[in-house]
Image: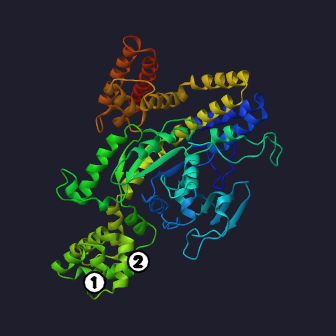
């Protein structure tokens, strides 16, 4: 099976390949409309992991997108583009495509500043979304989807975001019975919705987790054909961490970053099990440091400011107004530019670094600011939660889409045929990870009620890639890990047979097998050495 994406789209791994082969085999056994849906599932399997960056309006989503991509390309000021869903993906030529509701496209160049034009010059009500293609290595393995904020200024923006998250049916399709240009049946709304949406979500919160944050994550349930957002496919970031008042967080000892870390831990507990983790980040600082916004001229200005006496500097850093209006040798316009790029926290961090090392170069200062932003920790978590598990995430999403397509067909025989094929696939040992992801989803969503300690263990086993983390024994010798895996395998098998409800028993059998396969792997590795 070949990809149709510009990047050549290699399948994420053996699970995606198995699901793709299943779709290919079934195409001749289902209706033309369902077969067209399977073709779209195969296309998505060959594309990079689709990660939506979502959150409330003014949470700093687009700024974070720019930082993740490493290029200031997503508009951050309120305008036409911030009301639209924008997909950033790898391309051989940098360009923007405006995709209209009727399916036709219009190509636009990036603006002189390298960003998507703030005004598109078209009727925005006729626009479905934007496709931005960039020659950017990050996007070869992950498509980043920037969404309008939930709670946006207009209902249309909210609707676009909800459609991306799968919370609403697609509004635009051809009439039933119409065919596309190559003669295959066009997907109807229900079928399109079954294969639409993101496969993972990076959810952006600020200081307070509100009810609509919980609701938004619940809306993601339908993003991959009704799979729940959970620790396998969702993480959250506490953005604008520098705006937190340390005194408002008990135990922070007056330190901004410690306060942000503690608050993020509390938010993680609140959002559990919808997300794998909540990490603090300063999106503005990350964007400036990572996308070329921080220049040697900025470093020179900060060096001048570092030479001010302590009393003057502390006074200037009390507020943005005082910082830009205070009389000093650095012109007010330059200080305003620093404020827009770094905010007061970043300025203070840079000055502290310069005072600690007066010979620090502009490049080293930029790296210091990047470290202070928390972006690297977010990237590392993305790699752990998403990149390392992309094969399982994409395969599980694809299977859910296949199931939804069969259900939407309205043909009981077709539905049973697809169901039987999926059961054969899931019975294979190599497909056990999909069973584990299914069990994790059931427990995380509350569909299967488990005692809290057992639920936590299921979440740990299903949402980690590292053996030590799976077993709750990081850094321990292989012999101890193998013994623990075998002991837990036995315990879960006993639980499945004695004392578990039927629903719990199904989950327990899956967890038992996960531990047993892990023990086999550890044993075989030891024998090979």
Q: Which mark is residue 57?
A: none
What residue sits right under mark 2 in the picture? Answer: 295
Left or right: 71, with 8 as reference point: left
72, 362: nearer the viewer = 72
Q: Are marks 2 and 1 in contact (CB under 8 Å)?
A: no
Query: Residue 80 appears at what percent x and percent y?
Result: 58, 65
Is residue 219 shown above or below 93?
Answer: above
Query: Residue 299 appears at what percent x and percent y?
Result: 34, 78
- Give the mark nearest the N terminus, 2 or 1: 2
Please identify the quarter of the rendering in which residue 121 is found. bottom right
Query: Residue 234 appears at what percent x and percent y?
Result: 45, 43
Q: Residues within 10 Å of mark 1 (few under 14, many from 20)?
A: some
* Residue at screen point 52% across, 37% down: 392
Please identify the quarter of the rendering in which residue 277 is found. top left
Q: Residue furthest front?
A: 154
**Is residue 212 shown to the viewer in this render?**
yes
Q: Residues within 10 Å of mark 2 (few under 14, many from 20)?
A: few
Callout 1 secondary element: helix
Is residue 68 shown above or below 77?
Answer: above
Is residue 118 shown above or below 150?
Answer: below
* Residue at screen point 40% across, 24% down: 449
Callout 2 secondary element: loop
The colour scheme used to paint the residues is: rainbow
* Residue at screen point 74% across, 39% down: 36
Q: Residue furthest bottom?
A: 329
Query: Residue 138 appears at what percent x and percent y?
Result: 52, 57
358, 50: nearer the viewer = 50
What residue sits right under mark 1 in the picture? Answer: 304
């Amino acid at each position: 099976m070949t990809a149709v994406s510009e990047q050549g789209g290699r399948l994420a791994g053996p699970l995606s390949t198995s699901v793709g082969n299943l779709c290919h085999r079934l195409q001749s056994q289902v209706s033309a409309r369902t077969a067209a849906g399977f073709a779209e599932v195969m296309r998505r399997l060959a594309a990079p992991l689709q990660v939506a960056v979502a959150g409330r309006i003014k949470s700093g989503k687009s700024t974070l997108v720019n930082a993740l991509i490493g290029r200031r390309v997503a508009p951050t000021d309120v305008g036409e583009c911030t009301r639209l869903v924008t997909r950033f993906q790898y391309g051989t030529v940098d360009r923007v495509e405006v995709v209209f509701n009727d399916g036709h496209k219009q190509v636009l160049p990036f603006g002189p500043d390298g960003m998507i034009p703030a005004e598109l010059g078209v009727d925005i009500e006729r626009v479905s979304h934007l496709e931005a293609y960039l020659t950017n290595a990050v996007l070869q393995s992950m498509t980043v989807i920037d969404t309008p904020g939930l709670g946006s200024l207009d209902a249309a923006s909210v609707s676009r975001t909800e459609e991306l998250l799968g919370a609403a049916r697609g509004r635009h399709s051809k009439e039933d019975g119409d065919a596309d240009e190559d003669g295959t049946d066009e997907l109807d709304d229900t079928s399109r919705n079954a294969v639409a949406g993101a496969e993972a979500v990076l959810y952006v919160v600020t200081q307070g987790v509100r009810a609509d944050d919980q609701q938004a994550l619940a809306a993601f349930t339908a993003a991959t054909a009704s799979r729940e957002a959970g620790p396998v496919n969702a993480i959250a970031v506490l953005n604008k961490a520098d705006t937190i008042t340390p005194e408002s967080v008990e135990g922070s000892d007056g330190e901004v970053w410690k306060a942000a870390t503690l608050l993020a831990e509390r938010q993680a507990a609140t959002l559990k099990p919808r997300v794998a983790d909540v990490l603090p980040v300063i999106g503005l600082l990350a964007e400036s440091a990572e996308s070329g916004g921080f220049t040697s001229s900025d470093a020179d200005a900060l060096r001048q400011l570092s030479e001010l006496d302590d009393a003057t500097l502390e006074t200037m850093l009390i507020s943005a107004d005082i910082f830009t209006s205070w009389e000093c040798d650095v012109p007010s316009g330059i200080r305003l530019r620093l404020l827009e790029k770094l905010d007061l926290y970043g300025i203070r961090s840079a000055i502290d670094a310069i005072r600690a090392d007066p010979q620090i170069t502009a490049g080293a200062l930029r790296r210091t600011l990047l470290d202070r932003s928390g972006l690297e920790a977010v990237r590392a978590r993305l790699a752990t939660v998403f990149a390392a598990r992309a094969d399982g995430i994409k395969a599980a999403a694809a299977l859910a889409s296949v199931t939804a397509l069969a259900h939407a067909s309205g043909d009981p025989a077709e539905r049973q045929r697809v169901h039987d094929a999926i059961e054969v696939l899931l019975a294979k040992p190599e497909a056990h990870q999909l069973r584990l992801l299914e069990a994790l989803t059931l427990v995380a969503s509350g569909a299967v009620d488990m005692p809290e300690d057992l639920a936590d263990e299921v979440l740990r086993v299903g949402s980690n890639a590292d053996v030590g983390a799976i077993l709750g024994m990081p850094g321990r010798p292989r012999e101890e890990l193998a013994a623990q895996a075998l002991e837990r395998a036995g315990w879960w098998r006993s639980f499945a047979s004695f004392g578990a409800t039927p629903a719990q028993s199904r989950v327990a059998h899956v967890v038992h097998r996960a531990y047993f396969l892990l023990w086999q792997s550890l044993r075989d590795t030891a024998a090979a050495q």
